[in-house]
Structures are given as structure tokens and as C-alpha cells.
Amino acid sequence: MFFPQFRARRIRGNEIFRRMVRETSLSVNDLVYPMFSIFGIGIKKEISSMPGIYQQSIENIVAEAKEVRDLGIPAVILFGIPETKDAVGSDAYSDTGIIQETIRALKKNVPGLAVITDVCMCEYTDHGHCGIIKNGDVDNDSTLDLLAREALSHAQAGADMVAPSDMMDGRVGAIRETLDEHGFDAIPIMSYAVKYASGYYGPFREAAESTPQFGDRRSYQMDPGNRREALREAASDIDEGADIIMVKPGLPYLDILRDLRNEFDLPLAVYNVSGEYSMVKGAAERGWIDEERVVLETMTSFKRAGADIIITYHAKDVARWLAGQVK
């Protein structure tokens, strides 16, 4: 049926009908809010390249987490800034590390909020890379033990889910085996299965203080030009025991997100990363875009491409907008 018998505007012209036939919907239940924890008291340091996002001491993390929960956002994902760094990232798997202490505080003071932890070494090593350095590069296999120890320490502190982001080959299997051996077989793994070596991470590196001190991460993160490789990476992590797979970054890789949704039936997450957030914030502050409209359109694009879970720094604003609240 073609024009004039078919007129798409018959439906579009009525708000009620538009809602009734909308193919993709966005919910606060889709959201995860990232947080950056640091030792100290009374610290709430805004990240210069990420307006509205802070490095915070634990009591302030708890206060904001209560706000997150009260907005209906179901989960946070934690990143830590340790007091000291060394070549093997000791604070990452210390029982008294920044993330471990933050987990305990959140589980004690913010019931009903799920706590997910990023599992990586870059924030904790003095060289800023995601594992043990040998011959000028990250040594894959010796790093696996440290990642497994880190994930186990998070589970022992009370984490509800662990999310390895390092892109070492075999790390999901190593973490799954270690968790299971220690009685944490019920802790799910959300794998950063498809993580590209991206220029969109710049503001995050300020937030997490994780800029590499030499070189870059192209030897372990994916080449932005590769599409088929994403399917292999995701399939490998699924075979090793991942419960959720993730694509990172989000907007530049919507095609990859859709490829994974077409290929696999596991829950699928996407990380709306710092650079994506900062570009929107910068344009909105200058009055160049309608922030609410652009952010909600972006979130809907993730859902339309196949994401079940959206990790985003916009989460609190999105929750307010969906509820019809004024910021």
C-alpha cells in the first residue's frame, strides 16, 4: 500500500497513538551509574572534563548512592583511586583497598542498590597499564591471576556482580574458576567483551587517574576498524562463563551492538563512555543542543540497537526526565 492510501502521519499526528506503537522503550531499570571512590574524608572533587561527575570519599559515595537508589536506578558500578600505586597494582586486590571498603559501606548503608565492580589494574598500577609489564608490554597470562584475585576480593567484600574490563585473553574463565572455587558461584560476570582502543576514554582517564605512563593500550584493546573480531571476542567470553556481555564505547559502535544482539541471546550491556558524555555536556552548556532531548535520544538508540543495560554518567538525569522531574 502506497501514498495516498497509506499515510504514516495518521499515526504520528496523535501523541497517544505514537506511544501505543512505539517500538523501543526506555526505563530507569535499564540504567547503571558509574562512581569514582577515593580515600579521605569530605572529598567531592568535580572532574574538570566531566561536569557533574566527581571523585568522592566513601561517605559522599554513600550519600550519592542513596540518591541514585531513590531515583529508581537499580545499580552502580565502582571505580577506585588508590592512595598508592605500584607495578603490580596491589590495592586492586587488597582486603582494605578503596573498592573493597566502598563496597562494604554501600552494602551496609544503601540496601536495595546493586553494586557492580570494575575489575582491572590500570587505576592501581604506577605505569597505568592493565596488568603486569614484561618486555615493554602487558603480559597476558601472569595478569590473569591478579585479575582473579581482584574479582574474588570484591566478591568477599560483598559485590553483587564483577565486570572485568582489562581485555586480557582468558580472564573471564580465570575469574569464573576462582569465584566458583571459593563459593561465589552465584556472583555473575558482566564482561567488557568488546572494548575498543578508543579516543573517547580521555575524560575517564582524568577521573580514574589511569593514563598510561608509556605507549597505549592497542596491544590488548580492540582495533576500531574490526567488526567480525567482536563476534569472536564475545563468543570466547560466553564460552568462558560470562553472564552479560558489553560493548564499549557506545555511540561509535552501535553496529557492533546490533551484531551482538543478532548473534547471541545473553543480556547485552553498553557503556556510554566519558567522551560521549563530555561532548553532550559541553554542547549543552553552550546552548548548542537540547540536552534532555539529545540524551534521551541517545539512550533510545542504545536500546534500539539491542542493549538491555546502559552504563551512563547521564543516569541520574535520565531517571529524573523519565519521571517528569525537574533537575
Image (tube, grey):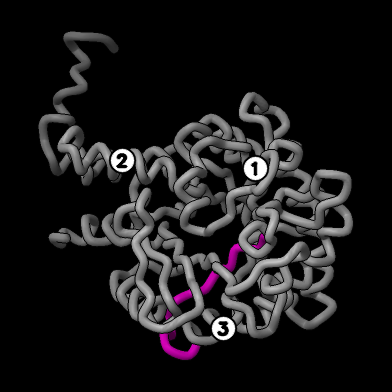
Residue type at the position of mark 2 = Val
Amino acid carrying mark 1 in the image: Val
Question: Is residue 242 visible to the viewer in this orientation of the structure?
Answer: yes
* Figure quadrant of residue 233: top right
Mark 3 is surrounded, within 10 Å at the Cα level, by few (under 14), some (14 to 19) or many (20 or more) other residues, namely some
Residue for badge 2:
280
Name the residue rendered at 66%, 48% in the picture.
Answer: 213
Secondary structure of the residue carrying numbered label 1: strand
Badge 3 is on which residue?
A: 101
In front of the other: 279 or 264: 279
- Cβ atoms at labels 2 and 3 below 8 Å apart: no
Asked whether residue 115 is drawn in magenta, I would say yes
Q: Residue at x 22, y 43 (%)?
A: 291
Answer with left or right where residue 91 lies relative to residue 282.
right
On screen, residue 13 versus residue 273, left or right, reads: left
Residue that protrudes farthest toward the top in the picture:
3
Which percent across, then down, holds residue 8? 21, 22
Closer to the eye: label 1 or 3 = 3
Could you say which disc has been placed on residue 194 in the image? 1
- The circle on residue 105 is none
Between 206 and 6, the one lying in front of the other is 206
